[in-house]
Image (tube, coloured by chain):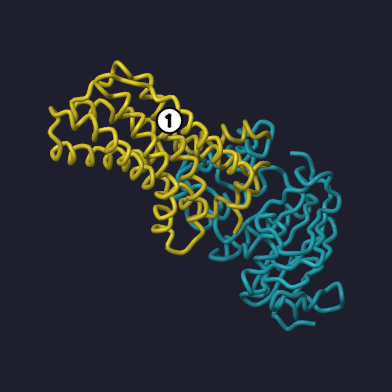
Amino acid sequence: MPAPTPTGLRFENIDKRYGGLFALRRVSLEIAPGECVVLAGRNGSGKTTLLRIAGRIVRPTAGKLSFPGASSESSTEGRPGYVAHTTMVYDELSAEENLVLFAKLQGVPQPAERADELLREVGLYERRTSLVRTFSRGMRQRIAIARALVHGPSVLLFDEPATGLDPLGISWLAKSLGDVHRSGCTVVMSLHGESEISALATRAVQLDAGSVVADTKSGASLHSILTFGGG
Amino acid sequence: MGLFSNTLTLLGKELRTEFRSRELLTTTVVFILVVLILFSFAINPTSEESRDFGPGLLWLAILFAGSLMLQPCFLREQANDTLSSLRLAVSDPFAIFLAKLMANTLFLLVTEILMLPLFAAFYNIPILPQLHYLLLVLFLGSLGVSVAGTALSAISAQARMRELLLPLLLLPILTPVLVVSATVSVSLLDREPVVQWKGMAFLAVFDLVFLTALWIFGEYLLEE
């Protein structure tokens, strides 16, 4: 897969309302190409909603999302890779079948070869024909990451990627995320607290009640944001 | 990737997962079989009545089996949030609907073709002379059940009381399809068969209208 085109993310006055409840309120955030940004905040602060809007899974009620550097919205650069709490793959299909499916849907040339390449990278090649439902939590997280990377995205979004992983799994994830980031990918992830993974961050943003309340770009410290101390 | 190739890829996935689990086919075949057998005891198969009531019962069984089959159509995409990954991957969300409704129509047709010989035997109705027309009605009617059902399945999957909601929405909408399909089938299986082209045209128009609506509004049905 060729190196990703440097692509950023721009949220302009994003609102998201579910009925009368504001999940996000006038969020404006500019993420430069190649940044590794941690979104921190208490449960319900709007991290997942912001990531789902960035992943274009959820449409904002108001405001605009764009991908500076992307040639078009439908291009690979305009289609971020997204890793959620759930695996977002089919339990009834094998690891290989899942990756080939998502590679084909996204027009990846030689989908079978790409699937094999990713399965080797995430250490699941030996289990490529096993159904995903037989996988452990750590293996599921690996296949979820492989799926998100299958089309060689320029922006990668992670929603609490370390949830349910043991220390070995977290170390593997930190290394993989580091590799992806070093390859030129813009990474945005939501995290709780400091960890091996948060050490990769070049910037941290804190959300509270659907609004940005602190940003290391505006002088707040990474430590205080990750521990919800705010600015 | 275009709409056509995405649809074919997703149809392949639908068929593969179904033929691996055989959940939907087993449910619908067993349901229709039970209904046909139970009612065959209630109606004297040698009487003229069976020609009048048989096709109606067959369609009623197809409709209820269809609603059973359509329930998990979008519901099973929720377990691992695979609907989100599909929406991220496809350029046109209509491909998701198109693949699902093609798979649902195919599953319904397979069930119906398996059940037709049993229906003919239990109700003592010769179906071979009019089989080609009968297959056309079954196709148009099943497509109607699938198109409306797939759309409503997407809506109900995101609602509370989802198990109750689909049949509640589906049955009133499909009443015209049920009535017309049964009427056309009764005429076809009569001692002096008549092809009701107006009925066939109604079914085709129903399918076309719902398919167009799904194409235009489908994207909104997939939103959270």
**Numbered circles on residues, count:** 1
Quadrant hosting residue B114: top left
Q: Label 1 belongs to which residue?
A: B199
Q: Is residue B210 left or right of residue A26?
A: left
Q: Position of residue A204 (x, y in %)?
A: 77, 71
Q: Is residue A110 visible?
A: yes
Question: Counting other residues with Cα less than 10 Å from the Cα at mark 1, is it few (<14), some (14-19), or many (20 or more)?
Answer: some
Q: Residue at x 38, y 34 (%)?
A: B181
Chain letter for mark 1, please: B
B174 shown above or below A181: above
Residue type at mark 1 is Gly
Which type of secondary structure does the marked residue at label 1 adopt?
Answer: helix
A77 shown above or below A192: above
Quadrant hosting residue B125: top left
Question: Front-most of B144 and B160?
Answer: B144
Q: Is residue B26 visible?
A: no
- Tint of chain A: cyan
Q: Residue at x 53, y 57 (%)?
A: A138
Quadrant location, the N terminus of chain B: top right
Chain ID, yellow in image: B
Q: Is residue A42 left or right of residue A202?
A: left
Q: Position of residue B99 (x, y in %)?
A: 53, 37
Q: Position of residue A114 (x, y in %)?
A: 65, 37
Quadrant hosting residue B3: top right
Question: Front-most of B174 and A170?
Answer: B174
A3 shown above or below B122: below
Quadrant location, the C terminus of chain B: bottom right
Question: Front-most of A103 and B105?
Answer: B105
Question: Front-most of B7 and A224?
Answer: B7
Q: Position of residue A194 (x, y in %)?
A: 68, 74
B190 shown above or below A16: above
Q: Residue at x 50, y 38 (%)?
A: B101
